[in-house]
């Protein structure tokens, strides 16, 4: 197991422990105040939202790490814009337009 993978697991283990401790702390304070566990139920949508957000981010970072370990690039390299009209894709055949796009990507957006 690589050190990057260990760091990722550790990071999200801490995140999950924190997410699961939120309702426990709310329950402890609720019981300390003399109330029952029912006020904790009001926060369940928030806890589930945090849990879903942590899980989504973990899946996203884990798949990026796997791609990196396999040596794949993050984005596929194409010479067209699939969602654009044909006129935009025809402009890419023009060398000056294509060079201007590449210059913008490398100089201003940091692409390689």
Image: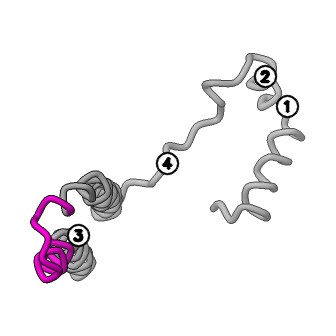
Find the magenta span and give its range: 24-39
> In x, y percent, where is residue 106?
73, 61
Q: Could you say which disc has been placed on residue 19 in the image?
A: 3
Is residue 36 on the magenta stretch?
yes
| Colouring style | one colour
Disc 1 marks which residue? 94
Label 4 with label 1: CB-CB less than 8 Å: no
Residue 99 at least partly seen? yes
> In x, y percent, where is residue 112?
63, 62
Disc 4 marks which residue? 75
The quadrant of the image that shows the N terminus is bottom left
Using a 10 Å C-alpha cutoff, classify the residue at mark 4 as few (fewer than 14 neighbours), some (14 to 19) or many (20 or more).
few
Q: Secondary structure at mark 1?
A: loop
> In x, y percent, where is residue 66?
27, 59
Disc 2 marks which residue? 90
Q: From the viewer's perspective, is the residue at label 2 or at label 1 nearer?
A: 2
Label 2 with label 1: CB-CB less than 8 Å: yes
């Amino acid at each position: 197991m690589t050190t990057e993978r260990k760091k990722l697991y550790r990071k999200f283990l801490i995140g999950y422990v924190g997410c699961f401790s939120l309702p426990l702390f709310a329950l402890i304070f609720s019981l300390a105040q003399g109330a029952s566990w029912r006020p904790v139920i009001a926060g369940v949508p928030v806890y589930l939202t945090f849990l879903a957000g942590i899980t989504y981010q973990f899946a996203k970072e884990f798949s990026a790490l796997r791609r990196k370990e396999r040596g794949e690039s993050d984005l596929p390299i194409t010479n067209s814009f699939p969602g654009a009209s044909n006129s935009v894709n025809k402009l890419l055949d023009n060398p000056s337009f294509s060079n201007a796009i590449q210059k913008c990507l490398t100089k201003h957006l940091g692409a390689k």
